[in-house]
């Protein structure tokens, strides 16, 4: 018998934590279980050929388990359909958030033999045992059973040396979330469940000993239990103290309005380039927050972001979501401008998506929510934002990532934003789209030239434009006449930090 665990990751640098959990918990089937990851954009025929090269050759059963997510559902469907055409004897089992809800509507589920919804750590191995040894399961859909956390084998030893050297290592100290934000799948969780901390830290120790230096925590609420947070931060502080010339980098998702003094004290000990926080604000409008069941003290959240910027070296990604029910453009603009004034390193401008199973759908009729029927199910219009305006927001988001979040235009950006950041950048975004008719594949030289054109249209002289752009563009000035070369202190950007963050550090 052969069991293949597979998925299509969004990027090669991503390593699937979910598949490694399954492999770690296969019990006496673990030796027969192999991991095969691919990347979206790969040819379907190539993926199918590579998977079939590992099927059982003795006529015994081959099972392929696919991890299905919002970003790979369409390509996974093609892979499963082709597998069923060329090798119908192979048993296909699906799992993952995209097929755990509203599954009866999905073509990929119709094509597959079995489906595991929700937690798969023990349910998937049990299902494989039944398929192989009998009796053959009668039901197609198997609801994942949530085991005690101590019964789940941790998967970190399954990160290969190649993974450690070349890919982001995802880790989690807990699963679930106690909050009920209706746009998030975690709204369906009852609470957050921690793993045994000593065991988890021992796994981190082992990864570090093998050379791991970049750790991305997927916990929804890293700072929910401050005692646990402090112990994890201390782990990384100890590593930084012991190996200052070989630094670690850690990424956490923070609850924005919960930052007690003990946590602040620990955070201040981290040097630049070692710590990154993702902070979900989503909306500063209290009425919108109430509509989507998001409990947040906006003043505390703003104060904490301001403190992190001024008193720590942590790199901040702060999230806003456009298209939430009850929020119009003016309301979103006020929140955006408020966030800009706090000066986080990056503002992640997201567009609302209807994740399958999330309660956000209950607002559809009242607020005229119209979602794209195809993944990733992006909001197309609401009763307060029409389709054309929503498309302008989508383009704004893309250009914001290219110009602001990239760190390449740190000195130029404040000039573009002026006193009305949202509407000023929206005007720039509209103009940029008219000039390029594109939001992707804009070469950096061309983008820098377009930024210069826009600044001139706003009344800046050639000399002023050349001067400010020459200090930006990630240390590589655009091809402008008589523009002096900037001096970039690259030695201050730790090599372990992601490249984009390193650019922010040099700005």
Image: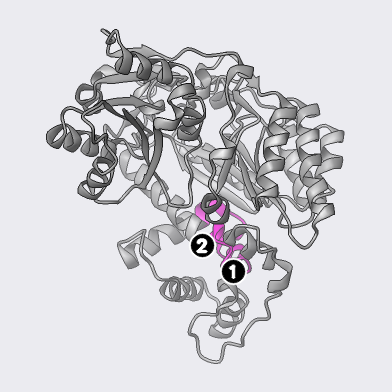
Q: Which mark is residue 412?
A: 1
Residue 344 is left or right of residue 183, and the answer is right
Name the quadrant containing residue 382: top left
Which residue in the rendered view is the most extreme toward the bottom?
482
Q: Which residue is mark 2?
A: 403
Residue at (51, 72) in percent of width and height: 455
Label 2 crowding class (10 Å Cα cut-off): few <14, some 14-19, many 20+? some
Magenta residues? 403-424
Looking at the rendering, in which quadrant would you find the N terminus? top left
Out of 187 and 483, give the one closest to the viewer.
187
Q: Secondary structure at mark 1?
A: loop
Does 407 appear in magenta? yes
Q: Is residue 163 left or right of residue 373?
A: right
Q: Nearer the viewer, residue 95 or 267?
A: 95
- The percent coordinates of residue 373 (x first, y second) are 26, 32
Mark 2 secondary-structure assignment: helix
Q: Earlier in the sequence, mark 1 or mark 2?
A: 2
**Residue 104 magenta-highlighted:** no
Q: Is residue 349 above or below residue 89?
A: below
Q: Residue at x 13, y 37 (%)?
A: 86
């Amino acid at each position: 018998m052969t069991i293949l665990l597979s998925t299509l990751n969004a990027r090669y640098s991503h390593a699937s934590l979910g598949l490694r959990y399954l492999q770690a918990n296969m019990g006496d089937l673990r030796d027969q279980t192999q991991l095969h990851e691919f990347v979206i954009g790969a040819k379907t025929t190539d993926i199918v050929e590579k998977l079939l090269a590992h099927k059982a050759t003795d006529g015994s059963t081959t099972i392929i388990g696919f991890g299905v997510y919002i970003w790979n559902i369409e390509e996974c469907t093609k892979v499963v359909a082709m597998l069923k055409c060329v090798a119908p004897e192979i048993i296909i089992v699906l799992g993952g958030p995209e097929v755990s809800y509203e599954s009866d509507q999905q073509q990929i589920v119709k094509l597959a033999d079995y489906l595991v919804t929700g937690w798969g750590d023990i349910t998937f191995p049990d299902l494989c045992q039944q398929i192989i040894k009998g009796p053959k399961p009668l039901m197609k859909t198997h609801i994942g059973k949530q085991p005690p956390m101590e019964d789940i084998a941790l998967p970190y030893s399954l990160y290969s040396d190649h993974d450690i050297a070349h890919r982001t290592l995802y880790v989690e100290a807990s699963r679930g979330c106690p909050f009920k934000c209706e746009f998030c799948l975690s709204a369906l969780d009852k609470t957050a469940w921690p793993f045994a901390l000593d065991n988890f830290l021992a796994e981190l120790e082992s990864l570090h000993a093998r050379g791991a230096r970049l750790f991305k925590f997927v916990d929804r609420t890293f700072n929910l239990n401050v005692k646990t947070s402090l112990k994890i931060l201390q782990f990384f502080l100890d590593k930084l103290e012991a190996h200052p010339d070989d630094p670690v980098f850690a990424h956490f998702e923070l609850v924005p309005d919960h930052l007690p003094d003990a946590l602040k004290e620990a955070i201040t000990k981290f040097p630049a380039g070692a710590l990154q926080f993702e902070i979900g604000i989503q909306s500063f409008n209290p009425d919108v927050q109430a509509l989507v069941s998001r409990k947040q003290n906006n003043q505390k959240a703003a104060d904490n972001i301001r403190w992190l910027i001024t008193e720590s070296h942590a790199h901040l990604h702060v999230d806003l979501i456009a298209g939430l029910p009850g929020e119009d453009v003016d309301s979103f603009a006020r929140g955006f401008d408020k966030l800009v004034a706090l000066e986080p390193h990056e503002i992640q401008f997201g567009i609302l998506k209807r994740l399958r199973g999330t309660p956000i759908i209950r607002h559809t009729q009242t607020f005229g929510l119209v979602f794209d029927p195809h993944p990733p199910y992006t909001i197309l219009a609401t009763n307060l934002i029409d389709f054309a305006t929503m498309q302008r927001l989508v383009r704004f988001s893309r250009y914001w990532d290219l110009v602001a979040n990239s760190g390449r235009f740190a000195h130029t950006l404040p000039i573009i934003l002026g006193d009305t950041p949202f509407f000023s950048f929206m005007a720039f975004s509209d103009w940029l789209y008219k000039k390029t008719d594109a939001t992707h594949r804009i070469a950096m030289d061309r983008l820098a030239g377009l930024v210069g054109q826009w600044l001139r249209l706003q009344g800046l002289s050639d000399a002023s434009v050349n001067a400010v752009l020459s200090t930006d563009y990630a240390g590589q000035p655009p091809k402008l006449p008589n523009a002096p070369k900037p001096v970039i202190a690259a030695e201050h950007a730790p090599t372990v930090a992601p490249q984009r963050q390193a650019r922010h550090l040099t700005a």
